[in-house]
Amino acid sequence: MRFLIPLLLLAALGARAQTAPQPYEASAPLSWELKNARWFDGQKLQQGSLYVENGVFVAKKPAKVNRKMDLRRQQVLIPPLAEAHNHNLQTAWGWKQYADTYLDEGVFYAAMLCGDPANVAEVKPLAATPAAPDVSFVTACITSGDGYPLASLLREPTREAAAAQQQLVLLDSPEQAVQQWPAIKARGGHWLRVVLAHSERPELRDKPEMFGRLGLKPEVADAVVRLAHADGLQVVAHVESAADFDAALNAGADVIAHLPGYANLLGEPPEQLLISEAAAARAARQHTAVITTTAATELFKLEPDALAALREVQRRNLATLQAAGVQLLIGSDVFIGTTRAELHALDALGLDHATLLRLATQDTPRALFPKRRLGCFEPGCEASFLLLGGDPIADLGQIDQPLLRVKQGRLLTRLAEVAAASSQLVTSTADPAPAARASGRKGGKSSKATAKGGSKPSAKSSTKKPGSGAAKASKTSAKTSSKATKASRS
């Protein structure tokens, strides 16, 4: 197990025989030398050599190197992806089902936007391990007494049932916001979430079929945001319509979750979902970020014409926000998926690949964890990265097949023996085997034969000297990306 790539390829063959994949494990923190590397810097590909020690990138080669890889300017390194809007890791059951999917898809950072304190308390120890995505949890999710998502949460859509549940905080007036504020703060976290849904349509509150599908009155959202900001907390606002978008800006929300037009549950004219240039300019002035969630549109199973109309609204809203300089964050709100689905949805809407990669690997993780140095390869940045088989700027599909996953210098793998053996000194795909170097220094026939390239290793020696196989694997890894992908998932 001295050579990384051949080992992973062999591990993939063994993994095929298993009926269920093993959970990810993390190696000890490794020192790395990545020769002839190419990496994404937020705009384009850079190239050179990179070094890792103690979980961060460093300027010089470490004295002790556990992993030396010559990437030969074929593969590409990118920072891990981030998911700004989901709910699938906020319970212990969801964590068991989906946490490894995040690592499979190269998503190391995530925000769960509507957990409750009891469930999140069970998940936090699981998220605090090296082989786990890093998660920011919202544990104060605030809506009205007849608001979203009560319709999906309750068996009986009644106010009595709503009052009995514990996951959501229900507020129907500014006075209630003040009264309940100590209890809201006690739920913990640095963020809270307010729900605005069709706030411009107060007449909908009189319709039984709309129970559990609405949200806070604008004046209640205003009160909550004022209280939160006074205590140093930030607010993410769920919106449905363009009017909700305006109401969130009026309240002073820090982040708006959902691009208006991700859904059209009331069947309103598409122009009701368009963000105005004035609203986009205000969002830019207020430094209000917007989470995209365009992948979630597919969950509504719309007719082709209705889907096409929503996609056009999304294109126009994205263009308006980008023209104004509004910060976009990548989030899918797809419970069975991750931000990878959102990247492909935004790609289909016309966003260029370099911008998408920057949003997913730099802007979004830094917004989720602002005190950490993420999404970069300079000395001092966290040494977390994905190895791809080719250039994702030219082919965004490369993100679907990461060949290697490294988190803070640790190799992530599904095989315990690989994780345990990874810190052995020295594993290399760059240098010839020691015996080969020694034979080159000796005189006589062996050195002459080596110089002429005429000497062939015996079958016995080839089984004991796997260095040449590692070099070959490194040269041909782009051609064997499917095998390497399976191996890295092992």
Image: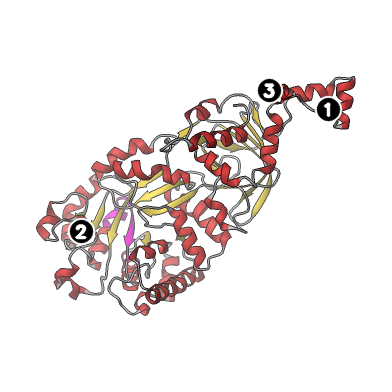
Three-letter amino acid code at disc 1? Ser
Three-letter amino acid code at disc 3? Lys
Q: Does the magenta stretch include residue 408?
A: no
For marks 2 and 3, the one nearer the N-term is 2
User: Circle 2: is it few (<14), some (14-19), or many (20+) Cα within 10 Å?
Assistant: many
Q: Residue at x 11, y 60 (%)?
A: 159
Give residue 464's mark: 3
Q: Of discs 2 and 1, which sits in the foreground?
A: 1
In the rendered view, does 154 fall on the left or right side of 239? left
For marks 1 and 3, the one nearer the N-term is 1
Residue carrying label 1: 455
Which one is in front, 462 or 221?
A: 462
From the top left corner, tell me how far across and down residue 192 is, in percent. Answer: 30, 53
Q: Can residue 442 be seen in this view?
A: yes
Q: Of discs 2 and 3, which sits in the foreground?
A: 3
Q: Is residue 235 magenta?
A: yes
Three-letter amino acid code at disc 2? Leu
Q: Distance between the residues labelled 2 and 1?
A: 75 Å
Extent of the magenta region: 225-239
Q: Do the residues labelled 1 and 3 touch (CB within 8 Å)?
A: no
Residue carrying label 2: 150
For marks 2 and 1, the one nearer the N-term is 2
Q: How far apart are marks 1 and 3 (CA)?
A: 17 Å
Q: Residue at x 47, y 44 (%)?
A: 104
Q: Do the residues labelled 2 and 3 touch (CB within 8 Å)?
A: no
**Res. 298 image quadrant:** bottom left
